[in-house]
Image (cartoon, helix red, strand yellow):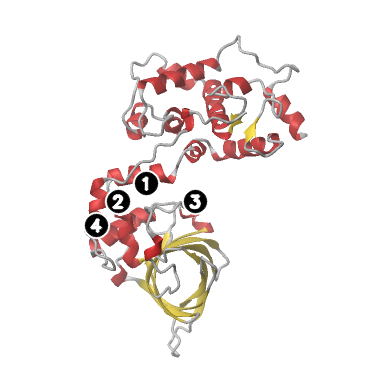
Amino acid sequence: MERVPTILFLITLVTMSGAAQSAQAAEKPGELLTPELEMAVFRHLNKEDRLLNRQAVWPRNTEELDGGDDVSGEWVLFTTMFMNATTGEGIMYVKLEQDGDVISGINGQLKHPFDPPSTIRAISDRTLRGLIKGKWYPGNRTNMMVFERQAGTTDGGSVPARTWAIFTALIAADGRSAMGKIVNHGGYYGTFFMIKREALKDYLPLLEEEGRRAYEAKRLLGIEQLEAGLPTEQLHFSVQFWWRSDKNKDGYLSYEEFPHPDWHRANLNGDEFLSWAEELTDVAWRRLARDGKYMASYSASSSGEWSSRSEWGCDRPGFDWLFPFIDRDRDEKIAADEYETFEVQVKSYLDESFPKTNERGETGIEVYKRMTGQ
């Protein structure tokens, strides 16, 4: 049977705001931002989780760009070392010169990893200045570079030069950004995201509320929105659970593959296949029904629709994670029919008349143990 996608999981792509487009259009190619705007972009990107980065940049016509064949120029690096977690991001500046496959340059620190965001410096005020030396490696469509950040001097000064950290980066096809790994002299490692200084203007939309909402919609599309709504431990358990159950690895679960008691209830569009998105929603609904606090707090509430994610969060504190599971058409609003469908579905998990076991008399966890050998 052909698998017909349900409207439950169609994605509404949010376009960039007119104000954000105007801000970008005002910048001429190759022109740098004002120092004030640069600092504003620094502060915003410093709050991003570099370990889980999804690039916050709008689609571009890469045919008009150089493809990263020459990395010469000024770059800003946003780093997160393993020891820093997500609360100790550092910011670096490097100016690179490429001659063939040889890379040289200078570097400096714009924010030390453990310092608060208020200490972010302008590029002209950078500290811990040092040298860069490295090598460029050509690829088929994506190029790579490896470079050392050296601290100290190389001309016999009081502080001898030494390798402070090594960076390995894959250069994006447009030549304006790169992503890679970093390891420092202490053995700590992490990731970094580097942007050409002239390309910082690509991130101006993030300084406006409409731009941030548009970016968030592009950053977490469809299933990613649902996955982000679950605790990490629960998501990992569900992924393992799904992978082991999907015997033919077609990305769907048939009832024959996993005949758990809630299969028919989780199969929201009523076809013969259970999608991963439907399974995630089922996990969320079962969690909500099991906890019981939400229905106890809001079952008699008169509120029935919300115009934004923030409005929902203010009205339902502690239940922000539910938003993507209720916003079925991904328009960043919860309509009355979406909320009514959500309540009906959650209440179905509290229905005592619904079977708690499958045809073999097994509960969900018993089926899981049998099928995974635990």
Q: Are marks 1 and 4 in contact (CB under 8 Å)?
A: no
Work out how far the residue at label 2 is from the one at label 1, CA to CA, in angstroms: 8 Å
Q: Are marks 2 and 1 in contact (CB under 8 Å)?
A: yes
Quarter of the picture containing the C terminus is: top right
**Which residue: 71% across, 29% down?**
257
Q: Which quarter of the figure has residue 35? A: bottom left
Q: Earlier in the sequence, mark 3 or mark 4?
A: 4
Q: Position of residue 259 (x, y in %)?
A: 69, 24
Q: Position of residue 5 (x, y in %)?
A: 52, 31
Q: Earlier in the sequence, mark 1 or mark 3?
A: 3
Q: Which quarter of the figure has residue 359? A: top right
> Is 234 located above or below residue 144 in the figure?
above
In the rendered image, which residue does mark 2 sit on?
205
In the rendered image, which residue does mark 1 sit on?
215
Inspect the image, locate mark 3, and give the three-letter code of the amino acid beneath it: Leu
- Nearer to us: label 2 or label 3: 2
Q: Secondary structure at mark 3?
A: helix
> Is 253 located above or below residue 207 in the figure?
above
Q: Secondary structure at mark 2?
A: helix
Inspect the image, locate mark 1, and give the three-letter code of the amino acid beneath it: Tyr
Q: Which quarter of the figure has residue 334? A: top left
In the rendered image, which residue does mark 3 sit on?
52
Work out how far the residue at label 1 is from the one at label 4, CA to CA, in angstroms: 18 Å
- Nearer to us: label 1 or label 4: 4
**Which residue: 42% across, 63% down?**
174
In the rendered image, which residue does mark 4 sit on?
25
Work out how far the residue at label 2 is from the one at label 4, CA to CA, in angstroms: 11 Å
